[in-house]
Image: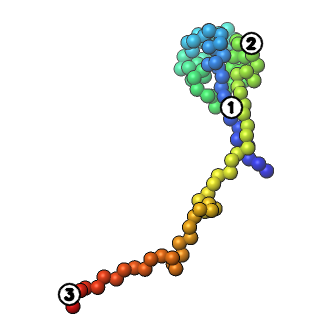
């Protein structure tokens, strides 16, 4: 089984810019018209950060505001995960066995 990495891009700021809404606070009354009450910091995070959890009511309200579907708001990409390379299986690792190592030097006193 091949492991898949799934990523998404939150495009709310792009949708707002296309509609001419350049301030995050411009979204507050539009959401309120649809029964969604969010504080200014919550709306700021909703617009400028990629949310981990969003209520479906909020997504539905945003889609209604911008006359779009969820696929316009969220772009999903998936790809096969790349296998991690480990240091033990690398072909350029030299085996340093005892026969190849230099011998320890002995220091002899020349005074005798």
Per the model, the C-alpha gap separating discs 2 and 3 is 96 Å
Residue 45 occupies which quadrant of the picture? top right
Q: Between 39 and 16, which is closer to the camera in this rendering?
A: 16
The residue under label 1 is 8
Q: Between 28 and 90, which is closer to the camera in this rendering?
A: 90
Q: Tell me where residue 4 appears, x and y as whole percent.
A: 73, 43
Q: Secondary structure at mark 2?
A: loop
For residue 111, the mark is: 3
Residue 70 occupies which quadrant of the picture? top right
The residue positioned 36% from the left and 80% from the top of the image is 105
Q: Is residue 16 left or right of residue 79?
A: left
Q: Is residue 32 visible?
A: no
Q: Earlier in the sequence, mark 2 or mark 1?
A: 1
Q: In the rendered image of this protein, does residue 38 appear above or below residue 86?
A: above
The residue under label 2 is 67
Q: In the rendered image of this protein, does residue 106 appear above or below residue 63?
A: below
Q: Secondary structure at mark 1?
A: strand
Per the model, the C-alpha gap separating discs 2 and 1 is 20 Å
Q: Earlier in the sequence, mark 3 or mark 1?
A: 1
Q: Is residue 17 visible?
A: yes
Q: Is residue 11 left or right of residue 107?
A: right
Per the model, the C-alpha gap separating discs 3 and 1 is 77 Å
Q: Tell me where residue 110 appears, x and y as whole percent.
A: 23, 86
């Amino acid at each position: 089984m091949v492991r898949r990495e799934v990523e998404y891009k939150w495009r709310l700021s792009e949708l707002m810019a296309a509609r001419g809404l350049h301030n995050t606070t411009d979204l507050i009354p539009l959401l309120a018209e649809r029964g969604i009450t969010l504080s200014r910091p919550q709306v700021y995070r909703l617009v400028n950060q990629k949310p981990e959890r969003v209520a479906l009511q909020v997504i539905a309200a945003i889609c209604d505001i911008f006359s779009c579907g969820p696929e316009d708001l969220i772009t999903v990409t998936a790809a096969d995960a790349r296998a991690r390379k480990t240091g033990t299986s690398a072909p350029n690792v030299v085996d340093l066995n005892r026969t190849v190592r230099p011998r320890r030097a002995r220091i002899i006193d020349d005074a005798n």
